[in-house]
Each structure stands twice: as structure tokens, then as C-alpha cells.
Amino acid sequence: MKKRLLTAVLAFLFGNFGIHRFYLNQPGLGILYLLTCGLLGIGSIIDTIAFLLMDDDVFDARYNTHAFLSNRMKGGLKQRRLPRKQQSLLVAKQLKELESMYEKGSINFEEFEYLKQKLLSEI
């Protein structure tokens, strides 16, 4: 599971080399940062600030989707509304993760349908 503060530290210390993007399993962005020296240093500064200001739930939803869904299934997250566009993107990403869990056999069809309806009802 990826850690938000560790990501922010990596972005601050090694952002020009894209290490934080490799850590987040984003090798394409990591290579881009490496070739452009952290988008001329601006990208790594913006990333550092963004990760420091980002809420843990939002970070988990973006970069730890599987853990986020597992926690959500157990009812462990505080329910709070995100902006509509962000909520829609989050639900779309969670539906993809849910579908991959079903395809891998981690959940059965009934669980898949129940969780899908639960996610769709949040939009």
C-alpha cells in the first residue's frame, strides 16, 4: 500500500528524477519526469505540495484503489461528498477495479453486482 507522506517526501527529494511516479506505479510519468528533469523542476514542486495537501481518502482512492475498495466494503471510510466530477471519476476507477477483482475471481457475481449498484448509487 502506497503512503501519501512518503510519496510527498520522494517528490521533494527526488522529484526531478521522477522517483515518486515510479513509486506510484506510473512509469510513463516517471520517465517523463526523468527526461525533463521533473518538468523543469516545476512538476516536482507542484506534486510535493499536492501530495502534502491531499486528503488520505483521496490519495487512497487514486493510488491504493484495491485497499480503498476493501475498506469501503467494510464500511470503514467516513462518507463525505466529493465534487461531482471528482466523484464520477472516482466511481469509474472503482468500477474498473471491481471488475478486475471479479475477473480474477476475488469476488463472486453476486458480490460484484451488489458492490456495483452501491457504487453507482453514490453518483
Image: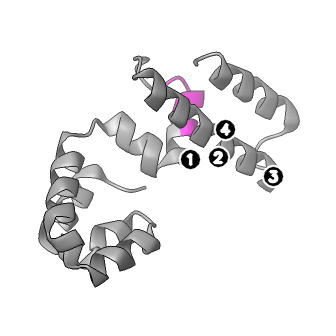
**What SS does tag 3 mark?**
helix
Membership of 72 in magenta stretch: yes
Residue at left offset 35%, top offset 76%:
32
Percent position of residue 48, x then y = 17, 56
- According to the picture, the residue beneath numbered tag 1 turns out to be 66
Membership of 74 in magenta stretch: yes
Q: Earlier in the sequence, mark 4 or mark 3?
A: 4
Disc 1 from disc 3: Cα separation: 14 Å
Secondary structure mostly taken by the magenta-highlighted segment of the chain: helix
Q: Which residues are magenta?
A: 69-76
- According to the picture, the residue beneath numbered tag 2 turns out to be 97
Disc 2 from disc 3: Cα separation: 10 Å
Q: Is residue 37 above or below residue 25?
A: below
Question: Disc 2, disc 4: CB below 8 Å?
Answer: yes
**What SS does tag 2 mark?**
helix
Disc 4 from disc 1: Cα separation: 11 Å
Residue type (three-letter) at the residue carrying disc 3:
Glu
Q: Earlier in the sequence, mark 2 or mark 3?
A: 2
